[in-house]
Image (tube, rainbow, N blue to C red):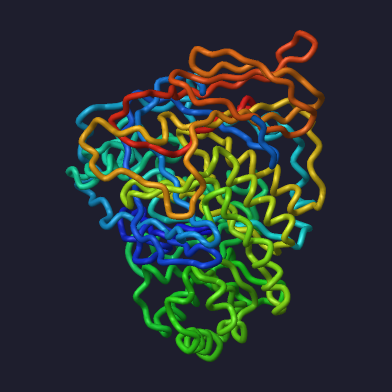
Amino acid sequence: MKAESSGSRRKPDGRAEGHRSGHRAQPASHRQHGSRRGRRTLVVSLASAFLILGISAATGIAWDPFSVSGGSKAQAPQIGQPWSVTPSGRTPATRSEPPTTIPSATALARPTPAPVEPPTTPGGGMATDPKPASAALPFDMPSAKTLRGSRRLVFAHYFTPYPLSLDNEPSERDYYTRNYLQPGGESGKHERYGGLLRDRPLPVAPKSGDWELANLREEVRTARAAGIDGFSLDLLSLTGKNWERSNELLDAAASVDPAFKVMLMPDMTSLRADPVALADALARLAAKPAAHRLSDGRLVVSPFKAEAQDVGWWKQMLDRMRQQHRIEVAFVPLFLDYGSHSGEFSPISYGFSDWGSRSYTGQEGGTSDARRAHSAGKIWMQPVSVQDARPNQGIYDEAGNTSTLRSSWKHAIDGGADWVQLTTWNDYSEGSHFAPSLHNGYAYLDLTSYYLSRFKTGKWPKVVRDTVYLSSRTQFAHATPVGAQDLVMRPREGTATPRDKVEVLSFLTAPATLRTTTGQVKSSHRAPAGLHAELLPLRTGTSSAQSERQGRVTARVELRYPVRDSVKVQDLQYYAATSGR
């Protein structure tokens, strides 16, 4: 979403209303984000597609410290997961666009031409059966009471085009497998860039009854267990499947946990409503118990790319909410160009946010942005991101393994942000997802729980279990696909220099020796207690690592997707795994 920004829209899950384009630039993926300082035009168009052949679920991984010194086995699809980032002063990342069309009933029912084995966990179970967080994390999660007692809030940007399932079919033949992960899916419309997606949600078993509501409840439970306070809901449209899913998400949240809230985020790169129509639609959602309100009762509305309309337009919307619906609004505009627009929006705003940068070298503006907002008497919502790679836009940001995640969290903490928005929860077309996925398991979400705990409590969690995380790409940054793909991703202007590294991130209770294997090369290094990141050269083959102390192995992790020299589809997302799950 946005931190550095890529603002492109995504397709509605429903498959396919356009969603973000720079966050919407014109819809691209979901965020098109203008880079923070010197923001430039938004990148519009999101989606990337990929091809998955033999699949095994990847386990989750957690990343650690902010300092770096310096993959597991399993048949993996040869696909690429792009990232796009727009650091401050760099070309802003924009949101990716949502699918342009929503799969029809006929398309959803279409049999898969070549069944794929359902993804499973290493133990053979469905990929959605994680180990309890109490045993999977390197630290003990603070209690829900402690986390909710904090004035600091954490929201995850929810993108409606990509729910856990689009058709309630077994994963080996569902819509994701048939049409989004394969280059030839949806009648070949994504073949030019190798397929719409490079990753997907962890597969879930088909359900009886209202399976869509049941799956949304599952996502709420997953986010809540990670310590997240709520979703920031990307409103791509006011009718159709994305609108229906938006309503269902609010219902799901209320039924799972009344304390889990949904912040309304009209996507101004996608919506074409006038002030009256938007106010009336928001009022309908505001009637639902899960709609996020301040303690004084004001409804929080945080439009994506608020500068798409001028202040006068927004005043009409706010007046309509107040006069016609008797709803007072706490307006928190999210800009793709915060520096150029915060002054004019200040009189009508409760707080500010922006989409941010997706490169680890583009996070410096976060602290000054928070300071600027606070000096104006506003709260600041800081974007925190993992990575960004958009095959269908031909652009990506260099995230430096988990460096972007760790750096963006560090700036949110050090800068005194009031709220954080994880950009994104599930925009698979941008490769920016924190939600558990086929290739990353719970790795990025587990790591976020660590920083989230520090952000909300003011204290770094104590490491009580040795845990090791690995991350790397499955191909080299400059590899040229040998298949039919002719639109390849290039680094976004201003992003960090692309690199080919394996990152070993360790959380240790005491110093230990880390023994690693990358391809055919074995090595070792000493790691201190606490968090430590070590970089190793990327090599073909699989990577693994284990921590040893006094002759005993205390943790072991393997990246289940091998690195290949020759690839059919470009996939520049970083895959991650954790020893904890």
Residue 446, picture quadrant? top right
Q: Residue at x 31, y 54 (%)?
A: 99
Instruction: Using the image, determine if residue 570 lies above or below residue 238.
Output: above
Q: Nearer the viewer, residue 177 or 471?
A: 471
> Is residue 163 visible in the rendered structure shown here?
no
Question: Which residue is nearer to you in this view: 159 or 563?
Answer: 563
The answer to whether residue 533 of the structure is visible from this angle is yes
Q: Is residue 130 above or below residue 269?
A: above
In the rendered image, the quadrant that contains the C terminus is top right
Q: Nearer the viewer, residue 93 or 226?
A: 93
Residue 535 at x, y percent in the picture: 60, 29
Residue that appears at 33% across and 31% down: 52
User: Is 116 rendered above or below residue 358?
Assistant: above
| Residue 428 appears left or right of 338 | left
Rendered residue at 45%/34% (across/down): 438
Residue 221 on image: x %, y %: 59, 46
Where residue 225 appears, as percent x and y from the top left, is 65, 44
> Looking at the image, which is closer to me, 374 or 292?
374
In the picture shown, does residue 247 fall above or below 483? below
